[in-house]
Amino acid sequence: MERKSDGTFFYPVKLITGVLYPDETRWRWVEEKLSALWGTPELISSEFLFTVTDYYKDISPVLYRRFLSFQGLRDGGDLPRWKWTACRLESESGLQRTVNIDPGYVNGARLVLASTKDHAHRVYIGDGIHGEVTLRFMHKKWEPFDCTFPDFAQGLYDEFLSAVRKQWVQEMESRRNIQ
């Protein structure tokens, strides 16, 4: 935790966003919109075919997932605001939602994702948003929980998340060396 210039505290994290999309046109649209909001992406994951659930079939029968991380350390307390921004973008994507945008954050110990849906393994964090610790980083690897989404539990995204975590570690070390 760090203190801001106004005396309040913030929790430094790396903002990431998972995106489900049906085609390259929609992916480019999301990437452009998120870049305008949160800056040029620092890292972009490989493309993954998304097959673990048909929950998002209203978007498209075939979906892909990618992740983006953004430069700098951000205040993890902004997670509800990031989620509502993502919901607004989803509604702007077409007559019916054509993408799913899930913001979250990575730090040295965990991946947290935001959700508008309550569930036993989610904690209400304010403004209608719940936070879910989706993965934890233990013993030099990402570990799932019994309620972790299957694609995350399978380790498909571990390489990307580890690269983001490495960026977080480097930025935190840099901040400590300055202070």
Image (cartoon, rainbow, N blue to C red):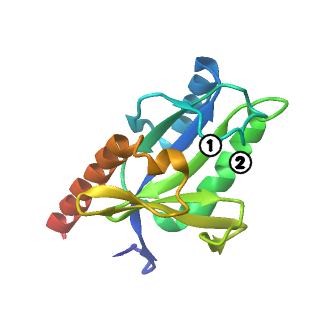
Q: Are marks 2 and 1 in contact (CB under 8 Å)?
A: yes
Using a 10 Å C-alpha cutoff, classify the residue at mark 1 as few (fewer than 14 neighbours), some (14 to 19) or many (20 or more). many
Q: Position of residue 85 (x, y in %)?
A: 66, 50
Tell me which numbered mark, 2 or 1, is placed earlier along the sequence. 2
Mark 2 highlights which residue?
Answer: 87
Q: Quadrant of the N terminus?
A: bottom left
Q: Give the image location of residue 100, x and y in percent.
A: 66, 40
User: Which of the pair 26/70 is nearer the observer?
Assistant: 26
Q: Residue at x 25, y 56 (%)?
A: 171
- In the rendered image, residue 177, in percent from the top left (x then y), is placed at 14, 65
Q: Residue furthest bottom?
A: 7
Residue 64 visible in this rendered orientation of the protein? yes
Residue at 73% across / 67% down in the picture? 128
Figure quadrant of residue 78:
bottom right
Residue 17 or residue 50, whichever sits in front: 50
| Amino acid type, label 1 | Ile
| CA distance separating discs 2 and 1 | 7 Å
